[in-house]
């Protein structure tokens, strides 16, 4: 006999916007100031600017996307640790698991960003080398991962705040890059990952969509800043 269980759907991720809403979202980002970045965020942004240049580029964005998923991995790991600790309290364990599912969905979203960026790097014929585009991202990701889980253990709100700053930075970088490259409006979206990520009218809209995803990630993290511990999460 086969038992059928109704399972809640995995989170769909940030909403996909049409062209008009994407342009509105870009204006909103460009009209709003960046967050006040703390020391740890600056410790990541400075070397990235030094190594990859202050200006946005597909290779720089690919590098940022490699490290973008790291805090979500760290939170997923901490979630399983908390689940193990609280498995005797089913309501709390369920809330912890909900956060794990959310962290996994955000990792997937960041993974699509990375794949899209790598695709654009290749189509653009940009050069990547082992030192700058393999080793350096690994080092920064290693640093970020350990900072994320240690902060989460000690003061989880600081871990969420750090990610919110990282996402705010990414949102502004994408939206600014599109504003500074009007030619992207006339480049069709290659649609390499259209089945998974959607198809857009132009590369400009594709990048605006990614920028908007980063805003959603930022807002989610800021929401978690106000209820950082698992037992504070509302049912
Ligand atoms: Fe991203
Ligand atoms: Fe993000």
Image (tube, helix red, strand yellow):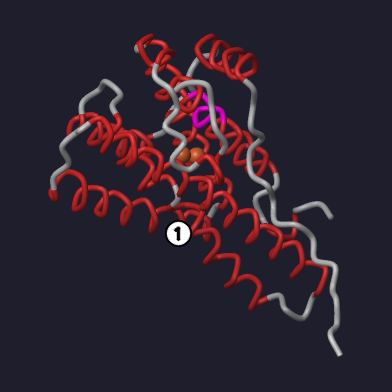
Q: Quadrant of residue 218?
A: top right
Q: Is residue 145 above or below residue 45?
A: below
Expressed as whole percent of the image width and height from the top left, the position of residue 189 reads 45, 27
Give the dominant element type of the magenta stretch: helix, strand or loop.
helix
Expressed as whole percent of the image width and height from the top left, the position of residue 37 reads 43, 29
Residue under the image location 52 percent in, 58 percent down: 154
Q: Secondary structure at mark 1?
A: helix
Instruction: Provide the residue span drawn in magenta.
Output: 208-212
Expressed as whole percent of the image width and height from the top left, the position of residue 200 reads 53, 27
Nearest the camera: 123 or 144? 123
Q: Is residue 158 above or below residue 184?
A: below
Question: With 78 as the anchor, is 114 left or right in this view?
Answer: left
The quarter of the rendered structure image containing the C terminus is bottom right
Residue under the image location 69 percent in, 64 percent down: 96
Tally of marks: 1
Expressed as whole percent of the image width and height from the top left, the position of residue 106 reads 56, 49
Q: Which residue is mark 1?
A: 150
Residue under the image location 53 percent in, 56 percent down: 152
Q: Quadrant of residue 199?
A: top right
Question: With 34 as the anchor, is 146 left or right in this view?
Answer: left
């Amino acid at each position: 006999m086969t038992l059928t269980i109704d399972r809640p759907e995995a989170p769909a991720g940030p909403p996909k916007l049409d062209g008009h809403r994407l342009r509105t979202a870009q204006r909103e980002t460009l009209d709003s100031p960046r967050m006040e970045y703390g020391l740890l965020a600056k410790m990541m942004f400075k070397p990235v600017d030094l190594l990859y240049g202050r200006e946005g580029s597909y290779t720089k964005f690919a590098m940022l996307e490699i490290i973008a998923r790291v805090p979500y991995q760290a939170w997923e790991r901490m979630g399983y640790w908390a689940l193990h600790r609280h498995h005797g309290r089913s309501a709390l364990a369920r809330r912890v698991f909900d956060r794990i599912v959310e962290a996994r969905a955000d990792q997937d979203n960041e993974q699509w960003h990375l794949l899209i960026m790598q695709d654009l790097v290749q189509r653009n014929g940009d050069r990547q080398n082992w030192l700058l585009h393999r080793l350096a991202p690994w080092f920064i990701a290693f640093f970020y991962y350990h900072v994320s889980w240690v902060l989460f253990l000690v003061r989880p709100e600081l871990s969420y705040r750090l990610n919110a700053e990282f996402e705010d930075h990414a949102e502004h970088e994408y939206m600014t890059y599109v504003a500074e490259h009007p030619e992207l409006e006339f480049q069709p979206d290659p649609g390499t990952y259209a089945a998974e990520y959607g198809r857009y009218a132009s590369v400009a809209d594709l990048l605006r969509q990614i920028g908007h995803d980063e805003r959603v990630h930022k807002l989610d993290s800021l929401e978690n800043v106000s209820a950082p511990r698992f037992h504070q999460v509302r049912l």
